[in-house]
Amino acid sequence: MTRLFIGLPIDAQMRLALRPAHDALSGHDHILKTVPPENYHITVKFLGECDGNVANAIESTFLEIAVPDVDIPFTLSGMGAFPDMKKPTVIWAGLLAEPGPMSLLFKNVERFASNFRFREEKRQFSPHLTLARLRSGRKITGDLLKFIENNSKTLYGESSFTRLALYSSKLTPEGANYTEIKSISF
């Protein structure tokens, strides 16, 4: 079984811009697990565990996904938690991008995934960058709560998505290791 997902890689400039947020969140490792900056990406479609035949078919046809002809500009701005600050599971940085190209890309990826009998996502695509995941049963309080509130409107920077990537993900006790298998340039 191979654990797969499709995502938009974040460039080195944006990883560097997010470093202060990563460092601040890392100081709360008793209640959360930060995502290493080298793993920063925007998930477009999580496929999960795929048997060998399906994984091979996905990999061999991945380049057929229709992607934009030009880069997609975006802004990373703000910080918050999903599903909300009272019962958080994820701390995120917000992503602002032109909705047309992002929506079309999302639909094309969904169409591609449906060829392999993956369920279509019913929720509207809400692109975000996961900065950390809270440990089970933990809450955001004190200094961490203040930090997130103080950064709810912080502008981290602007860049562009230049490619769509197929990743494999291996779970380890230290966290997930992502490997880019293939990518399609815009």
Image: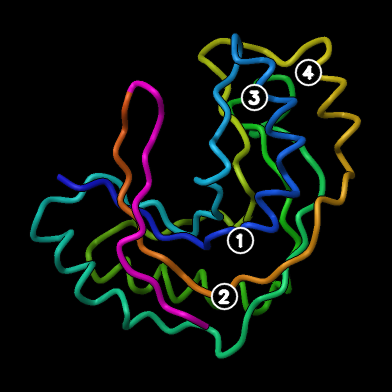
Residue at mark 2: 162
C-alpha distance separating marks 2 and 1: 9 Å
Q: Residue at x 63, y 37 (%)?
A: 131
User: Disc 3 residue type?
Assistant: Pro
Residue at mark 1: 11
Q: Secondary structure at mark 1?
A: loop
Say whether disc 2 or disc 4 marks the residue closer to the N-terminus: 4
Residue at mark 3: 88
Q: How is the image coloured?
A: rainbow
Q: Residue at x 86, y 36 (%)?
A: 151
C-alpha distance separating marks 4 and 3: 12 Å
User: Disc 4 residue type?
Assistant: Leu
Residue at mark 4: 144
Q: Residue at x 72, y 67 (%)?
A: 159
x, y percent for residue 88: 64, 24
x, y percent for residue 92: 67, 39
The foreground one among 121 and 179 is 179
